[in-house]
Amino acid sequence: MTPFELQEPDTLAEAITLLDPDDPAVRPLAGATALMLMMKAGLFQPTRLVSLRRLDDGLRHIFIDERGELHLGALATLSDIERSALVAEHAPAVTQACHTLSNVRVRNVATLGGHLAHGDPHMDLPPLLLALGARARAVGPHGERWIDAADLFVGYYQTSLERDELLSEIVIPSPEPDTHATYVKFTALSADDWPAVGVAAAARHRDGVIVDAKLAVSAATERPTRLPAVEAALRGATVCADTIESAAEAAARSVEPLADLRGSSAYKREMIRVHVRRALVTVTRS
Amino acid sequence: MSALRQIAFTLNGRAVTADVAPHHTLVEVLQEQFALYGARESCAQGLCGCCTAIVDGRAVSGCLYLAAFADGADVVTIEGLADRNHLDPVQEAFISCNAFQCGFCTSGFILMTRQLLEQNPDPTDDEIRHYLSGNLCRCGTYPDIINAVHAAAATLHKE
């Protein structure tokens, strides 16, 4: 790695003043696992990194508020989230996704905020947060704002965060009763590889009819992507194999998979069809 | 830029200091400043587990961990497990089960096995495979490693 300067502020406000809105060679650093890979590969050569590890703002919190919404601090590690009884109870699909996210050592160090702010379309939690209707709190020099998870990811390794904005927490709303959610990760090269396709779904149904459905695809696409047209077609449809098969078909047709060493665009399109079907079967099972 | 800074931490139970640059990794500092070679960089991507060290009770990949982050922490490496006369029960189990061949990956597997057994004292084969999926053995001693984990679990139950 090329040398750089490292700053370790004590407060979120101080960290924000140390960031530079105009200089891409200055970046915030939390667990550092993803950024270290980029630095070792020479893809990122920072002049200055602002470490968030000493922040005293308590950004590792995990709690449920009086409205039943689950708050996850941006500096909570993925292990903190994986092992949280509150997360397992309120958002079991998040716990499930964490079990197969990278490996134990990375989960011990990588943070939720870094996982999202990196903007890598292969990350496991973004599609699930989209399907769960989550939102992110971002703090910058002019105060804070809320960003819908669906609006956070705008392109390949691109988020809607300004260079001098930091995520402080993610909020997952209280699910409607009887909502089932899942994340399906398809790896093409080895069982522990990054996903070639990620699919997240959340749905509830009553008397054999789908009341609500949310669907997101990741990894094969340039960014984690909600599929509103497919969701709309599912709403009000009967729970049956035909409904699910046509939704899977529509999902596969509605995205442009990127070809890479994990497969051609056509192969990934087919894998999207297969895994959207499997995800929908899981979340509509009674 | 990149001036050296002094960090102070506990290394295998001993208070130590080291002068590190911001871009130095933990595994580099363990090798170059403390002559501890049990954690070694192999894949350099956090995938293989050969550089495993325990920081504040949690396993990390030493190749993806900035040495500066060890400031104030409690760091344990494979060299810190045995006392003068006795190996750790997990080390004993790996020997009695022949759970290594060349030994390059062994320190990582032993440290991860200790973490696994702290969290799950009686893991199934599947739980062992899943927990250790981030550790690679190119000699292919995986069946013996699973036996060793069970053997270590049995020893720890008796203690």
Image (spheres, rainbow, N blue to C red):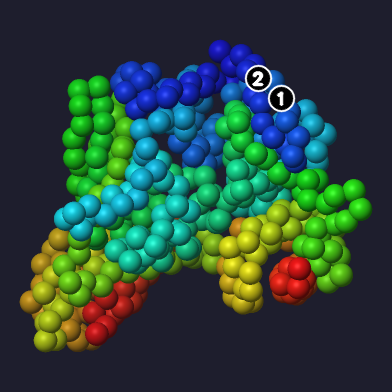
Q: Is residue A77 left or right of residue A158?
A: right
Question: Residue A279: where, in percent of width, then height?
Answer: 31, 73
Q: Which residue is mark 2?
A: B6
Q: Are marks 1 and 2 on the same chain?
A: yes
User: B11 and A23: which one is in front?
Assistant: B11
Residue found at the very far left of the displayed protein: A236
Callout 1–callout 2 Cβ contact below 8 Å: yes
Label 1 to label 2, Cα distance in Å?
7 Å
Q: Secondary structure at mark 1?
A: strand
A98 left or right of B2 in image: left
Q: Residue at the spot x=15%, y=79% of the render? A: A205
Which amino acid, mark 2? Gln
The amino acid type found where label 1 is placed reads: Thr
Point 25% across, 50% down: residue: A171
Residue B53 seen in the figure: yes
Q: Chain of mark 2?
A: B
Within 10 Å of the Cα at label 2, are there few (<14), some (14-19), or many (20+) other Cα atoms? few
Along the line of sight, the residue nearer the viewer: B101 or B154: B154
| Residue at horizontal 50 percent and vertical 51 percent from the top | A107
Is B95 left, or right, of A183 in this rendering? right
Quadrant (top left/top right/bottom left/bottom right) for the C terminus of chain B: bottom right
Mark 2 falls on what kind of element? strand
Q: What residue do we see at 12% from left, 82% from top? A: A206
Figure quadrant of residue B137: bottom right
Q: Quadrant of residue B1?
A: top right
Q: Which mark is drawn over residue A5?
A: none
Instruction: Name the residue beneath numbered marker 1.
Output: B17
> In x, y percent, where is residue A179?
21, 71
